Image (spheres, grey):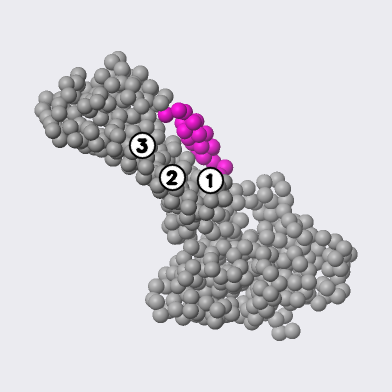
Amino acid sequence: MQTDKEKPILSTHNLNVWYGDHQILNSLSFEVQPRQVTALMGPANCGKSTLVRCFNRLNDFTSNFRFSGKILFKGSNMYAETTDVTAIRKKIGMVFRKPELFRCSIYENVAYGARIAGINQSSHLDSIVQKSLQRSGLWNEVESILDEDPKQLSIGQQQLLCTARALAVDPEILIFDEPCGELDPIATVKIENLIRDLANDCALIFVTNKRRQAARVSNVAGFLYYGELIEFGTTEKIFTNPQDTRTEQYVTGSLS
Amino acid sequence: MNSSMIPSELRKKIALQGGAVIIGGTVFVFFWNDLRKTAAAHIQTSSTSRISGILPSLISDLNLILPISLLAVLFGIACAFYLEEWCPATSWIRGFIGSQVNFLTEIPSLLYGLLAIMVLFSDPGVFKEIGAFPLAQNANGSGLEVALFQRNTLVFYAETLIFILMAMPIAIKTTQEALRSVATPIRESAYVLGATQWQVLTKQVVPLAFPKMLAGGCRSMSRVLAAAALLIGIHIPNHATGPRGIPDRFVLFLGGALLLSTVSSFLTIESGTQK
């Protein structure tokens, strides 16, 4: 595969995370390649969200968060003293489980990231908004109602709008933290297709607790079980020839 | 919402009309007769004050209340912002100020007033004892001038202190609650787009929390005014009274308290129906 030659865009080395005295993640090491969908799957409350929230330093807001180990973003330590956190967050976007929109128009929601980055030219903003909405596949549906309240959109459309908002700052990695958790099957299919399409441009990390969804969407998959990365490899290998018995049990459905 | 049976529009209407009735009633019962007679230069003999009517009280009290309330409420809001947004959660400052604020807000407001009368205004007052402030009396003028400036420095500082003691804890507490009411996902959605803490505060948190913060400010002011009105009601002999023997300041403060509490309830309803 051509991607094997590329350098990993994100890599973790021996990552441990604690909340207070409770250890959430236990020495994780893996790499995320550009232009691939990396799925992290596992049962609920096993540390998947905590892991991806380390990647854009959202855990910094949790008061009793502690960690050891290293996370390298394009070869540089993300948790170094000199790191510009907002710059990192611009490069590593995130879509949450529940679509959380700002209380302004659809246009302003998408333009938000560009505006706080200092872009104020309306023509430039227009093109950014249009491009991101087109990439997320929502342009045709909202073209005529750009200035209206996004609350009128269906929840699936809202999730696509959140994706467009994240795409507007042109991230190099986009993290989806269970994006389909609240969605109906049709919207889920849309999001899954979108994730596959977006993999042409950037690296995607996809967190899910549905093993079939991981199998459908990802190129590379990791199985996380109560803080440990049991197995990490190509999706094909994980699902057809798992090395660990727990992975086998999980992908066949007997462990959850 | 506890009253989800009633549609929000209807609730707003009920609140609006209720507020209008309360304010209108107060104005009609207390103010109208007094204002009318004041206009006819009705002068009541009183132990300390030489003119009566709402107007002198209004002017002289606004003179005191507006700057002080702005100071107390704004400082309370700033304090709440520091505690919620910048102070580390594990810091002892947060716990200490939090417990003090809780303690101060739970004290019935009348007790503050009694404190003011017993300790600060009484003849061998605390300030006089320690000689902290000069006791300049400047009541040598006449007419409106006296009404405006007759309060001496001691009283001014005592009023200021009590006012701040009463208004600030509530301002801190309500602002903290307002800031906490802005859901974490909203903040996080802004952070992951590369917003700085300042941008998140100014563009997301403050616009969403603003009605509640304003309501909190009104609530704290209303509490202060209501307590003041009650004390003046008890303390009639020292105050200028209207034609029916009701002290002007009592009317004024009570009206102000009602108005502010109504405004506060509007704002709370408004912020509740935003979702």
User: In the image, residue B101 lies at what x, y percent?
Assistant: 48, 35
Q: Residue at x 47, y 28 (%)?
A: B107
Residue corresponding to mark 1: B88
Q: Amino acid at mark 1?
A: Pro
Q: Disc 3 versus disc 2: distance between alpha carbons?
A: 12 Å
Question: Under tag 1, what secondary structure?
Answer: loop
Please indicate whether residue A49 sits to the left or right of residue B263 in the image.
right
Mark in the foreground, 1 or 2: 2
Residue corresponding to mark 3: B257
N-terminal of the pair, mark 3 or mark 2, is 3
Question: In the image, which disc is placed on residue A237?
Answer: none
| Front residue (pair A26, B13) | B13
- Residue farthest top in this picture: B124
User: In the image, residue A243 lies at what x, y percent?
Assistant: 87, 69
Question: Under tag 2, what secondary structure?
Answer: helix
Q: Residue at x 44, y 78 (%)?
A: A126
Magenta segment, which residues? B86-109
Q: Residue at x 53, y 66 (%)?
A: A151
Question: In the image, which disc is placed on residue B265?
Answer: 2
Q: Amino acid at mark 3?
A: Ala
| Front residue (pair A176, B4) | B4
Which quarter shows the C terminus of chain A?
A: bottom right
User: In the image, residue B250 lies at what x, y percent?
Assistant: 30, 29
